[in-house]
Image (cartoon, grey):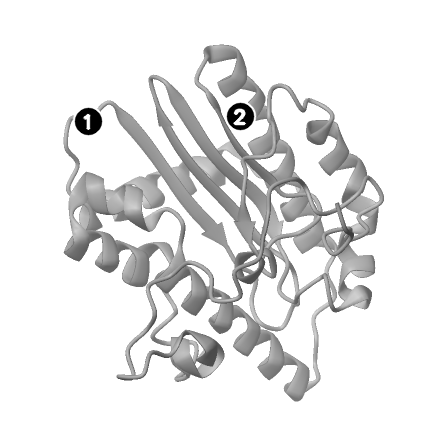
Amino acid sequence: MDLSALSYQKFVHIALEETQRRTILTPLPSQVLDFAAFSKPEFDLPIFCANFFLNANLSIVVLDLNPLYDVTIQRDYKEKYYMKLMPLGQKYAETIQLLPWGGKITSESLRFFSPIVIWSMLNSSKYKHDVLFSAFMDYFQTWLELMDQAVEETDALKILRNCEAQHKYLTWRAEKDPGHPILKRLIGEKLARDLLRHFLFEGVDTLGTRTFLDYFPEYRCKDGSINQKRSIIGKSYETRPWDARGEFIGNEAG
Protein backbone atom coordinates (compact mmCIF):
# COMPACT_ATOMS: atom_id res chain seq x y z
CA MET A 1 0.00 0.00 0.00
CA ASP A 2 1.39 3.38 -1.03
CA LEU A 3 0.17 6.15 1.27
CA SER A 4 -0.12 9.59 -0.27
CA ALA A 5 1.67 12.55 1.29
CA LEU A 6 -1.70 14.11 2.04
CA SER A 7 -3.05 11.10 3.95
CA TYR A 8 0.22 10.75 5.87
CA GLN A 9 0.19 14.43 6.88
CA LYS A 10 -3.43 14.11 7.97
CA PHE A 11 -2.58 11.04 10.05
CA VAL A 12 0.35 12.81 11.74
CA HIS A 13 -1.76 15.90 12.44
CA ILE A 14 -4.56 13.87 14.06
CA ALA A 15 -2.09 11.81 16.12
CA LEU A 16 -0.27 14.88 17.41
CA GLU A 17 -3.49 16.73 18.13
CA GLU A 18 -4.93 13.80 20.11
CA THR A 19 -1.67 13.27 22.00
CA GLN A 20 -1.50 16.95 23.00
CA ARG A 21 -5.13 16.85 24.11
CA ARG A 22 -4.60 13.88 26.41
CA THR A 23 -1.15 14.50 27.83
CA ILE A 24 0.71 17.18 29.74
CA LEU A 25 4.11 17.71 28.19
CA THR A 26 7.00 18.73 30.42
CA PRO A 27 10.51 19.76 29.36
CA LEU A 28 12.22 16.46 30.15
CA PRO A 29 15.24 15.14 28.21
CA SER A 30 13.36 11.95 27.26
CA GLN A 31 11.15 10.84 24.40
CA VAL A 32 8.44 8.17 24.55
CA LEU A 33 6.60 6.58 21.63
CA ASP A 34 3.90 4.04 22.53
CA PHE A 35 1.99 3.19 19.35
CA ALA A 36 -0.30 0.31 18.39
CA ALA A 37 -2.36 -0.08 15.20
CA PHE A 38 -5.23 -2.56 14.75
CA SER A 39 -7.26 -3.84 11.84
CA LYS A 40 -11.02 -4.27 12.04
CA PRO A 41 -12.03 -7.57 13.73
CA GLU A 42 -13.14 -8.82 10.31
CA PHE A 43 -9.43 -9.47 9.82
CA ASP A 44 -7.10 -11.55 12.01
CA LEU A 45 -4.08 -9.39 11.19
CA PRO A 46 -1.20 -8.95 13.65
CA ILE A 47 -1.11 -5.71 15.63
CA PHE A 48 1.54 -3.18 14.72
CA CYS A 49 3.40 -2.28 17.92
CA ALA A 50 6.13 0.33 18.45
CA ASN A 51 7.30 1.17 21.97
CA PHE A 52 10.38 3.42 22.19
CA PHE A 53 11.86 5.17 25.22
CA LEU A 54 14.84 7.33 24.31
CA ASN A 55 17.05 9.63 26.33
CA ALA A 56 20.60 10.93 25.98
CA ASN A 57 22.13 7.68 27.29
CA LEU A 58 19.68 4.82 26.79
CA SER A 59 17.22 3.54 24.21
CA ILE A 60 14.61 0.91 25.16
CA VAL A 61 12.84 -0.54 22.14
CA VAL A 62 10.02 -2.96 21.37
CA LEU A 63 9.03 -3.17 17.71
CA ASP A 64 6.85 -5.99 16.46
CA LEU A 65 3.86 -7.20 14.54
CA ASN A 66 2.23 -8.58 17.68
CA PRO A 67 0.32 -11.80 16.93
CA LEU A 68 -3.41 -11.78 17.53
CA TYR A 69 -3.05 -15.42 18.63
CA ASP A 70 -0.20 -17.05 20.56
CA VAL A 71 2.27 -18.31 17.93
CA THR A 72 3.97 -20.63 20.42
CA ILE A 73 0.70 -22.61 20.43
CA GLN A 74 -1.13 -21.83 17.18
CA ARG A 75 1.23 -22.93 14.45
CA ASP A 76 -1.32 -22.29 11.68
CA TYR A 77 -1.43 -18.59 12.60
CA LYS A 78 2.37 -18.39 12.67
CA GLU A 79 2.64 -20.03 9.27
CA LYS A 80 -0.07 -17.76 7.83
CA TYR A 81 1.72 -14.53 8.70
CA TYR A 82 5.23 -14.97 10.06
CA MET A 83 7.04 -17.60 8.07
CA LYS A 84 7.25 -15.30 5.04
CA LEU A 85 8.29 -12.40 7.31
CA MET A 86 11.31 -14.13 8.85
CA PRO A 87 13.73 -12.43 6.38
CA LEU A 88 12.53 -9.09 7.77
CA GLY A 89 13.20 -10.23 11.31
CA GLN A 90 16.59 -11.63 10.36
CA LYS A 91 17.55 -8.37 8.66
CA TYR A 92 17.61 -6.71 12.06
CA ALA A 93 18.45 -9.75 14.17
CA GLU A 94 21.71 -9.95 12.21
CA THR A 95 22.61 -6.45 13.44
CA ILE A 96 22.94 -8.10 16.84
CA GLN A 97 25.59 -5.72 18.13
CA LEU A 98 23.39 -2.75 17.26
CA LEU A 99 20.06 -4.21 18.39
CA PRO A 100 20.92 -6.91 20.95
CA TRP A 101 18.19 -8.86 22.74
CA GLY A 102 17.12 -6.66 25.63
CA GLY A 103 17.12 -9.24 28.39
CA LYS A 104 14.39 -11.08 30.25
CA ILE A 105 10.87 -11.29 28.84
CA THR A 106 8.35 -13.12 30.99
CA SER A 107 6.51 -16.11 29.58
CA GLU A 108 3.23 -14.24 30.17
CA SER A 109 4.38 -11.36 27.96
CA LEU A 110 5.89 -13.66 25.34
CA ARG A 111 2.45 -14.83 24.19
CA PHE A 112 1.95 -11.33 22.74
CA PHE A 113 5.24 -11.25 20.80
CA SER A 114 6.17 -12.74 17.44
CA PRO A 115 9.35 -14.43 16.13
CA ILE A 116 10.34 -11.16 14.40
CA VAL A 117 10.13 -8.98 17.53
CA ILE A 118 12.88 -6.40 18.10
CA TRP A 119 13.34 -6.07 21.87
CA SER A 120 16.48 -4.17 22.78
CA MET A 121 18.17 -1.87 25.28
CA LEU A 122 21.15 0.00 23.90
CA ASN A 123 23.27 3.08 24.31
CA SER A 124 21.82 6.02 22.42
CA SER A 125 23.53 7.37 19.31
CA LYS A 126 22.42 8.99 16.07
CA TYR A 127 23.52 5.98 14.03
CA LYS A 128 21.57 3.54 16.20
CA HIS A 129 18.54 5.80 16.08
CA ASP A 130 18.80 5.81 12.28
CA VAL A 131 18.78 1.99 12.37
CA LEU A 132 15.70 2.06 14.61
CA PHE A 133 13.94 4.47 12.27
CA SER A 134 14.72 2.21 9.32
CA ALA A 135 13.32 -0.78 11.23
CA PHE A 136 10.20 1.19 12.20
CA MET A 137 9.53 2.12 8.56
CA ASP A 138 10.15 -1.45 7.34
CA TYR A 139 7.83 -2.99 9.94
CA PHE A 140 5.08 -0.43 9.44
CA GLN A 141 5.22 -0.76 5.65
CA THR A 142 5.06 -4.55 6.04
CA TRP A 143 1.97 -4.24 8.25
CA LEU A 144 0.31 -1.95 5.69
CA GLU A 145 1.06 -4.47 2.94
CA LEU A 146 -0.45 -7.29 5.02
CA MET A 147 -3.54 -5.17 5.52
CA ASP A 148 -3.73 -4.44 1.80
CA GLN A 149 -3.58 -8.16 0.97
CA ALA A 150 -5.94 -9.37 3.70
CA VAL A 151 -9.23 -11.10 2.90
CA GLU A 152 -12.21 -9.99 4.96
CA GLU A 153 -13.76 -12.64 7.18
CA THR A 154 -17.53 -13.21 6.91
CA ASP A 155 -17.99 -15.92 9.54
CA ALA A 156 -19.63 -14.20 12.52
CA LEU A 157 -18.07 -16.55 15.07
CA LYS A 158 -14.54 -15.96 13.70
CA ILE A 159 -15.11 -12.19 13.71
CA LEU A 160 -16.26 -12.40 17.33
CA ARG A 161 -13.16 -14.46 18.18
CA ASN A 162 -10.89 -11.86 16.55
CA CYS A 163 -12.64 -9.08 18.46
CA GLU A 164 -12.16 -10.92 21.75
CA ALA A 165 -8.47 -11.53 20.92
CA GLN A 166 -7.99 -7.80 20.29
CA HIS A 167 -9.74 -6.98 23.55
CA LYS A 168 -7.60 -9.49 25.44
CA TYR A 169 -4.47 -7.86 24.01
CA LEU A 170 -5.68 -4.36 24.96
CA THR A 171 -6.63 -5.53 28.45
CA TRP A 172 -3.15 -6.99 29.00
CA ARG A 173 -1.38 -3.89 27.68
CA ALA A 174 -3.54 -1.47 29.66
CA GLU A 175 -2.73 -3.31 32.90
CA LYS A 176 0.78 -4.74 32.35
CA ASP A 177 2.29 -2.54 29.66
CA PRO A 178 6.08 -2.37 30.21
CA GLY A 179 6.02 1.36 29.44
CA HIS A 180 3.74 2.10 32.39
CA PRO A 181 6.55 2.65 34.94
CA ILE A 182 8.32 5.07 32.57
CA LEU A 183 5.11 7.00 31.85
CA LYS A 184 4.35 7.12 35.57
CA ARG A 185 7.71 8.74 36.25
CA LEU A 186 7.16 11.25 33.45
CA ILE A 187 3.56 12.35 34.05
CA GLY A 188 2.38 10.70 37.28
CA GLU A 189 0.30 7.60 38.06
CA LYS A 190 -3.17 9.02 37.34
CA LEU A 191 -2.28 10.58 33.98
CA ALA A 192 -0.24 7.52 32.95
CA ARG A 193 -3.15 5.15 33.65
CA ASP A 194 -5.59 7.45 31.84
CA LEU A 195 -3.22 7.66 28.86
CA LEU A 196 -2.92 3.86 28.68
CA ARG A 197 -6.64 3.07 28.97
CA HIS A 198 -8.21 5.93 27.04
CA PHE A 199 -5.68 6.79 24.35
CA LEU A 200 -2.83 4.36 23.75
CA PHE A 201 -5.07 1.31 24.21
CA GLU A 202 -8.43 2.89 23.56
CA GLY A 203 -11.03 0.18 23.10
CA VAL A 204 -10.31 -1.72 26.30
CA ASP A 205 -13.59 -0.36 27.71
CA THR A 206 -15.64 -0.67 24.50
CA LEU A 207 -14.54 -3.76 22.55
CA GLY A 208 -15.59 -6.17 25.29
CA THR A 209 -16.85 -6.52 28.84
CA ARG A 210 -14.41 -9.11 30.21
CA THR A 211 -11.97 -7.87 32.82
CA PHE A 212 -8.24 -8.46 33.23
CA LEU A 213 -8.91 -11.18 35.80
CA ASP A 214 -11.44 -12.85 33.50
CA TYR A 215 -8.69 -13.28 30.91
CA PHE A 216 -5.81 -13.83 33.36
CA PRO A 217 -7.24 -15.40 36.56
CA GLU A 218 -3.76 -16.46 37.68
CA TYR A 219 -3.16 -12.81 38.69
CA ARG A 220 -6.03 -12.77 41.21
CA CYS A 221 -5.00 -12.07 44.81
CA LYS A 222 -6.91 -13.51 47.75
CA ASP A 223 -8.65 -10.17 48.29
CA GLY A 224 -9.79 -10.11 44.65
CA SER A 225 -7.30 -7.46 43.53
CA ILE A 226 -4.79 -7.79 40.67
CA ASN A 227 -1.33 -9.05 41.58
CA GLN A 228 1.15 -6.34 40.60
CA LYS A 229 3.93 -8.80 39.77
CA ARG A 230 5.03 -8.90 36.15
CA SER A 231 5.11 -12.71 36.16
CA ILE A 232 3.18 -15.33 38.09
CA ILE A 233 4.73 -18.35 36.35
CA GLY A 234 8.22 -17.05 37.12
CA LYS A 235 9.77 -18.11 33.80
CA SER A 236 11.58 -15.62 31.58
CA TYR A 237 13.76 -15.63 28.46
CA GLU A 238 17.15 -13.93 28.57
CA THR A 239 17.93 -14.68 24.91
CA ARG A 240 15.78 -14.74 21.77
CA PRO A 241 13.51 -17.81 22.14
CA TRP A 242 13.04 -18.31 18.36
CA ASP A 243 15.57 -19.50 15.83
CA ALA A 244 16.18 -18.05 12.35
CA ARG A 245 13.32 -20.14 10.92
CA GLY A 246 10.85 -18.84 13.47
CA GLU A 247 10.78 -22.07 15.46
CA PHE A 248 10.24 -21.66 19.20
CA ILE A 249 13.29 -22.90 21.11
CA GLY A 250 12.49 -21.38 24.49
CA ASN A 251 11.73 -24.74 26.08
CA GLU A 252 15.09 -26.22 25.20
CA ALA A 253 17.45 -26.85 28.10
CA GLY A 254 20.55 -24.81 28.49
Secondary element type, mark 1: loop
The amino acid at mark 1 is Leu
Up-down: is 106 above or below 172?
above
Q: Nearer the viewer, residue 27 or 1?
A: 27
In the picture shown, does residue 209 fall above or below 61? below
Quarter of image, res 224: bottom left
* Residue in view at x 46 percent, y 13 percent: 125
Can you give x and y, in whole percent of width and height, for residue 126 in the image? 47, 12
Report the residue marked by disc 1.
28
Q: Which mark is residue 133?
A: 2
Q: Name the spot of residue 237 as percent of width and height, x first.
A: 61, 48
- What percent of the width, then of the height, locates residue 75? 80, 65
The front one of 106 and 9 is 106
Q: Secondary structure at mark 2?
A: helix
* Visible residue check, residue 20: yes
The single residue placed furthest to the front in the displayed view is 254
**Precedes in sequence: disc 2 or disc 1:** 1
Give the total of numbered labels: 2
- Whether residue 2 is visible to the viewer of this picture, yes or no, is no
In the image, 147: left or right of 119? right
Mark 2 or 1, closer to the camera = 1
Amino acid at the residue labelled 2: Phe
As drawn, is 141 to the left or to the right of 193?
A: right
Which residue is rendered at x = 15% and y = 48% of the image? 188
Q: Is residue 14 left or right of residue 193?
A: right
Above-or-below relation of 183 to 174: above
Residue beneath the point at 18% across and 53% down: 189
If the image is split into quadrants, where does the N terminus sit?
A: top right
Question: Neighbour class for label 1 at 10 Å: few (<14), some, many (≥20)?
Answer: few
Residue 95's spot in the image, x, y percent? 68, 22
The residue lying toward the viewer, choosing from 33 and 19, is 33
